[in-house]
Amino acid sequence: MRIRRLAVPVLAAALALSTQAAPAAALPAFPAFPGLPFPGSSVAGLPTVPATSSASGMQQALLDETNRYRASQGLAPLAPHPTLDGVAQSWSETMAQQRTLRHNPGYRDAYPAAWRQAAENVGMFSREVAARDMLQAWINSPSHRQHLDNPNFTHIGVGWAVSARGEVYATQNFAAF
């Protein structure tokens, strides 16, 4: 009998900051993620990128998947931003090296001047996955999906790193300019 090891997605509570005051709200509990697909499969009929792609290829795939999702919701695409990419990639690599999932406490300090609204999604899977799988985990989480569905965001930075043990850490840094 062969036992298949399932990937375990883990998401940190979504973090959003704005220069405008927002009403306080309790963060929802993390949702369960049953039935997420394996790399190479498709979700909702959309193709995925193989899990063995390079980090830069996975960053592009996650950007593409994010904008495909936003289009399906009637939202404008997010433009890639090199500075935000650097923030997200550096943080993903930090999490992979430390093998810990947490938000970057200083991410907005590294943003370019003039941002009006900022948010961050971070996630982790216990094995390599396709970009679509990471996005689907964020879509399934109300607090993360709130960032994906925010019509005010104009730009995004994406990070993707794999730990020495094969765990995937991903970061999305959103901004409205």
Image (cartoon, grey):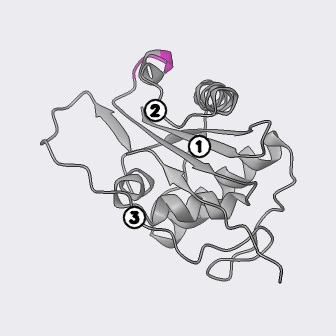
Q: Mark 1 — residue?
A: 79
Q: Is residue 19 magenta?
A: no
Question: Percent from the top left, x then y, of residue 67?
Answer: 59, 58
Question: Percent from the top left, x then y, of residue 108?
Answer: 42, 22
- The answer to whether the residue labelled 3 contacts the one labelled 1, judged by CB atoms less than 8 Å apart, is no
Q: Secondary structure at mark 3?
A: loop
Q: Is residue 141 above or below residue 114?
A: below
Q: Is residue 111 above or below residue 117?
A: above
Q: Secondary structure at mark 1?
A: strand
- The answer to whether the residue labelled 1 contacts the one labelled 2, judged by CB atoms less than 8 Å apart, is no
Asked whether 151 or 32 is in front, the reply is 32
Q: Which residues are magenta?
A: 110-114
Q: Which residue type does callout 1 highlight?
A: Ala
* x 50%, y 17%: residue: 110
Query: In this rendering, would 28 be left or right of 113?
Result: left
User: In the picture, which quadrant includes the N terminus?
Assistant: bottom right
Q: Residues within 10 Å of mark 3 (few under 14, many from 20)?
A: few
Which of the two labelled residues, at mark 2 and mark 3, occupies the earlier sequence position? 3
Q: Mark 2 — residue?
A: 103
Q: CA distance from mark 1 to mark 2?
A: 22 Å
Q: Which mark is residue 31?
A: 3
Q: CA distance from mark 3 to mark 1?
A: 29 Å
* x 80%, y 41%: residue: 55
